[in-house]
Every structure is written in structure tokens, then in C-alpha cells.
Image (spheres, rainbow, N blue to C red):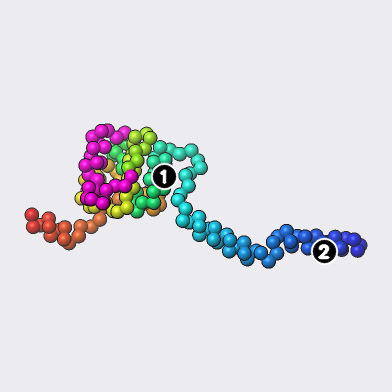
């Protein structure tokens, strides 16, 4: 009977050392630090097989751009040379406000643009006239809504 009692005590002592004892608060702090560090890392690629769209989107998102826009033809077809020229002609062209990264999907059915600024209303009006545009800056993509015209731009239009 004494032997079983001593074995139980020995087992309890060994178990408490194996669980870390008083170090559990430290490991919780360590986990918090790791979680904060991981929040600052660039996104990891999805582990499942990726579609051409997911590959292109990921390659732009890792650039940590303020705005990520996806352009698709309305009929779902591949981009023609005229479509590509239209994108080039209607992207912002002010010095220092160019698109930082363009990436065409491997299936040639979309373009992903990464920028560190917002597209202007004039650029979006032109691009929305020809393409479906979604904003993937944060989240899974939302339809792009034109920004309201500023009072200055309305006055400029009425004075012409």
C-alpha cells in the first residue's frame, strides 16, 4: 500500500515538472509576442492549389499596397491588345502616382493593379465603362463605387 502511495506522489511531482510548473505565464506571454510578430508578416500563399486569379492577386498583395484593384472584361473573355492599351491609357499618369505593380492572370482573363494611392474618379469612370472592377485592398473583394465629385470639380465642370 505504501508503495502505491509513493508512486502516486512521484507521478504527481514528475507530472508537474513536465507541464512547466510556474513557466505557464511566461509561455502565454511568448505566445502573445509571436502573435504580434506574425501580424506584421506578409501574407502567406494559400496552401491549396491556386487558380490563375489567386496567383496574380497574391503576387500583388505581398507588395503591401494601399489599393489593389482587379479588372475583368464584362464578357469574361481574355484581354485583347486593345483592352491592355485601354488599361494603360486610363491609368493615373501624374508623376509619382503611377500604378506600382500590374500583374496579368495566367489565364489572361484579369489584371491586378497594386497602388499606394487611390485611383481618381476620372480614371475609374473610364475603366468602369469597359471593365468590371473590384477592390481587393482589404477582404475578399467589393465592387468599386465611384467617389463623390468634390465641389471644386463640379464648379469646374459648370464653368466650361
The range drawn in magenta is 78-101
Residue 75 x %, y %: 29, 36
**Residue position for label 1:** 58
Residue 100 x %, y %: 31, 47
Quadrant placement of the N terminus: bottom right
Q: Is residue 131 magenta?
A: no
Q: Are marks 2 and 1 in contact (CB under 8 Å)?
A: no
Q: Is residue 55 left or right of residue 74?
A: right
Quick check: can you spot residue 135? no
The outermost residue toward the left is 160
Q: Which quadrant of the figure has residue 21?
A: bottom right
**Residue position for label 2:** 9
Looking at the image, which is closer to me, 81 or 134? 81
Residue at 36%, 49% in the rendered image: 136
Residue at 50%, 59% in the rendered image: 36
Q: CA distance from mark 2 to mark 1?
A: 56 Å
Amino acid at each position: 500500500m505504501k508503495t502505491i502511495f509513493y508512486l502516486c506522489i512521484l507521478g504527481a511531482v514528475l507530472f508537474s515538472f513536465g507541464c512547466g510548473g510556474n513557466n505557464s505565464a511566461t509561455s502565454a506571454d511568448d505566445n502573445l509576442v509571436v502573435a504580434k510578430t506574425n501580424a506584421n508578416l506578409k501574407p502567406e500563399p494559400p496552401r491549396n492549389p491556386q487558380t490563375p486569379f489567386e496567383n496574380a492577386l497574391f503576387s500583388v498583395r505581398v507588395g503591401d499596397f494601399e489599393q489593389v484593384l482587379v479588372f475583368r472584361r464584362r464578357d469574361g473573355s481574355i484581354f485583347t491588345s486593345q483592352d491592355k492599351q485601354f488599361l494603360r491609357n486610363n491609368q493615373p499618369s501624374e508623376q509619382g502616382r503611377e500604378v506600382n505593380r500590374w500583374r496579368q492572370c495566367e489565364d489572361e482573363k484579369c489584371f491586378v493593379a497594386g497602388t499606394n494611392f487611390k485611383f481618381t474618379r476620372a480614371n475609374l469612370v473610364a475603366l468602369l465603362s469597359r471593365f468590371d472592377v473590384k477592390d481587393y485592398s482589404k477582404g475578399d473583394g467589393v465592387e468599386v463605387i465611384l467617389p463623390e465629385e468634390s465641389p471644386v470639380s463640379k464648379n469646374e465642370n459648370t464653368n466650361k
